[in-house]
């Protein structure tokens, strides 16, 4: 059975049907998912109760995985990044713990792992357990945002380079450098990426931004920060945003090259268990 796709956002995001992701994907199926991500950016697969082994096998069929090597946030399974409200033992993650502080920055608009070089390319997030009224995750279409800019503005932006770092996103939610291990501070030095990216599958351009984006290389810091902030605000206007209301066992997969996303606040008493894994680009970007 082929991949069924139905657009559910205004400009992007599709409901994807017809695949059982617990089964190994054939190369044809991988190619279909890649093509659907290039076209829709975010795919929602319902009814996918994957265990750890199956989710890891699924993501690995798209390329080399990234590992949650930041010691401050790693759980028992190094292949995953758990972004829920409880730890491996089911204990609530305290808001003032290092992991709690780290996760709070997920509420800022971001694309995953842009502070790495090579950065993350695709992410798969599985809802394992949800509160009765789950907090939605919001997605922004940075291709539609790029297309909406006047050509004169596009020309000014096209060749700019942006510095990204994990410390930049964290400092915005109050997590300062001394909370990180010296290992992280040494291995996660700032990296630079183009502000505008071209998708290899279809040649479409998009903005490439995130909470990790700090400033423009070669510009005065404050001027570069102001531009990054202005463009993130532009790209996350309601007309470019889709808000996903989660159901248990949904797996949402997104293309980190041309979308951003953010978590919404949830401080309720019920556990929220989300398991994330990603693949990275093969070459520096
Ligand atoms: C992520 C993430 C948002 C959420 O897993 O990368 O940003 O709503 N998650 O949990
Ligand atoms: Mn994320």
Image (cartoon, rainbow, N blue to C red):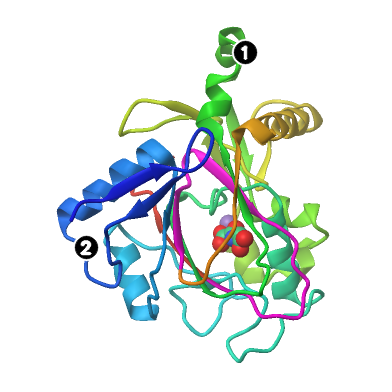
Left or right of residue 28: residue 63: right
Image position, residue 280 (x, y; %):
40, 54
Point out the quarter of the image occupied by ligand 1.
Answer: bottom right
Mark 1 and mark 2 in contact (Cβ < 8 Å)? no
Q: Residue at x 71, y 51 (%)?
A: 108
Residue 273: within the magenta? Answer: yes
Q: Nearer the viewer, residue 282 or 273?
A: 273
Looking at the image, residue 113 lies above or below residue 160: below
Label 1 neighbour load within 10 Å: few <14, some 14-19, many 20+: few
In the picture, the quarter occupied by the N terminus is bottom left
Q: Residue at x 34, y 63 (%)?
A: 59
Secondary structure of residue under mark 2: loop
In the picture provided, is 235 more to the left or to the right than 8?
Answer: right
Residue 25, numbered label: 2
**Residue 118 appears in the picture as rendered:** no
Observer-nearest residue: 276 or 249?
249
Label 2: few (<14), some (14–19) or many (≥20) C-alpha neighbours in 10 Å: some
- The single residue placed furthest to the bottom in the displayed view is 89
Disc tally is 2
Q: Nearer the viewer, mark 2 or mark 1?
A: 2
Q: Which label number is shown at residue 61?
A: none
Relative to 201, does residue 29 appear above or below in the rendering?
A: below
* Residue at the spot of label 1: 153
Q: Position of residue 170 (x, y in %)?
A: 73, 57
Q: Give, as a single range, the part of the protein colored magenta.
A: 250-274
Answer above or below: position of 62 versus 32: below
Tell whether position 44 is magenta: no
Q: Can you give x and y, in whole percent of width and height, for residue 78 in the image?
A: 47, 77
The answer to whether 71 is drawn above or below residue 185 in the figure is below
Q: Earlier in the sequence, mark 2 or mark 1?
A: 2
Q: Secondary structure at mark 1?
A: helix
Q: Residue furthest top?
A: 152
């Amino acid at each position: 059975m082929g991949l069924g796709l139905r657009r559910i956002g205004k400009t992007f995001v599709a409901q994807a049907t017809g695949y059982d992701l617990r089964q190994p994907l054939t190369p044809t199926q991988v190619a279909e998912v890649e093509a659907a991500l290039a076209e829709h950016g975010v795919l929602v697969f319902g009814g996918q109760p994957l265990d750890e082994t199956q989710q890891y096998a699924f993501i690995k069929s798209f390329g080399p995985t990234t590992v949650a090597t930041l010691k401050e946030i790693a759980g028992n399974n190094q292949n995953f990044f758990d972004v829920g409200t409880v730890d491996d033992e089911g204990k609530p993650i305290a808001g003032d713990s290092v992991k709690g502080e780290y996760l709070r920055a997920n509420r800022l608009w971001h694309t995953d792992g842009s502070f790495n070089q090579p950065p993350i390319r695709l992410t798969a997030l599985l809802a394992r357990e949800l509160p009765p009224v789950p907090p939605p995750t919001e997605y922004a279409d940075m291709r539609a945002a790029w297309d909406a800019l006047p050509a004169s503005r596009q020309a000014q932006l096209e060749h700019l380079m942006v510095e990204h770092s994990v410390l930049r996103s964290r400092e915005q939610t109050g997590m300062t450098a001394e909370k990180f291990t010296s290992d992280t501070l040494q291995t996660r030095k700032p990296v630079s990426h183009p502000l505008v990216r071209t998708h290899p599958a279809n040649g479409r351009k998009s903005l490439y931004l995130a909470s990790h984006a700090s400033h423009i290389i070669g510009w005065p810091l404050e001027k570069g920060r102001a531009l990054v902030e202005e463009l993130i605000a532009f790209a996350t206007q309601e007309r470019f945003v889709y808000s996903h209301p989660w159901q248990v066992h949904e797996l949402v997969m997104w293309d980190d090259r041309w979308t951003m996303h953010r978590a919404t606040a949830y401080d309720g008493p019920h556990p929220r268990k989300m398991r994330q894994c990603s693949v990275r680009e093969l070459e520096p970007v």
